[in-house]
Image: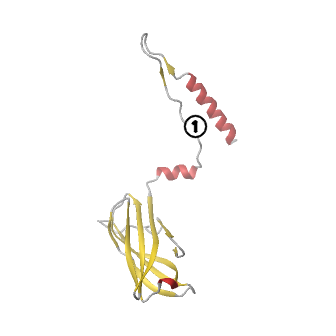
Amino acid sequence: MKAKKIEWIGFLVSILFSFSVAYAEEGDAVVEEEQPAAVVEEPASEAVAEQQPTRELYLEINKLEQRDESCIAYVRFNNKTDTSFAEFKPELFAFNKDDIITAHFAAIFSDVPANKTVVKLVSMKNTNCDNVGSILLNKILSCRDSESSIDGCMRFLTTGAKGAIKLFK
């Protein structure tokens, strides 16, 4: 069914193209219109998603680095929205390789402009980086623009991590 529809669209495009040559008045050059690009149908869900404004936030543990008795987490926050955040504050828990909580911390991002990526270094005191197996994004403690709190930040947030560490929600 889909193949016939694409053939039909191709047939119509070729007919329209054959009529698209317009002849100017005597003495002027012939002007040809460009052939339109091939039409590719998208599933309805993708077409609807394109019409919606981008509302995506991305939080990533990029790197862990040992400094004395603390493990420093390099936390990357990518604001792919049209909203500037006055504050974005995720609550995180680090688990060791035996799945036991070893640290509790928050990454506080302030004044993050729209469509901007920022990195914060967050200390996990009395934690050895080699023992950290995963980090849980427990909840969002604060998600605000310059005027008020924003609902649904967790829903628009995706997570990731580099290396062997895992960040999940």
Q: Residue furthest top?
A: 26
Q: Nearer the viewer, residue 148 or 74?
A: 74
x and y, in percent, of residue 114 in the image: 35, 59
* Left or right relative to 10: residue 87: left
Residue 153 placement: quadrant: bottom left
* Left or right relative to 25: residue 86: left
Residue 142 placement: quadrant: bottom left
- Reading the image, the residue beneath label 1 is 38
**Residue found 46% across the figure and 70% down from its top:** 60
In the rendered image, the vertical position of residue 146 relative to residue 30, given as above or below: below
Q: Nearer the viewer, residue 22 or 165?
A: 165
x and y, in percent, of residue 34 in the image: 50, 29
Q: Is residue 36 visible?
A: yes
* Left or right relative to 15: residue 64: left
Mark 1 nearby-residue class (10 Å; few <14, some 14–19, many ≥20): few
Q: Secondary structure at mark 1?
A: loop
Q: Is residue 142 visible?
A: no
- Amino acid type at mark 1: Ala
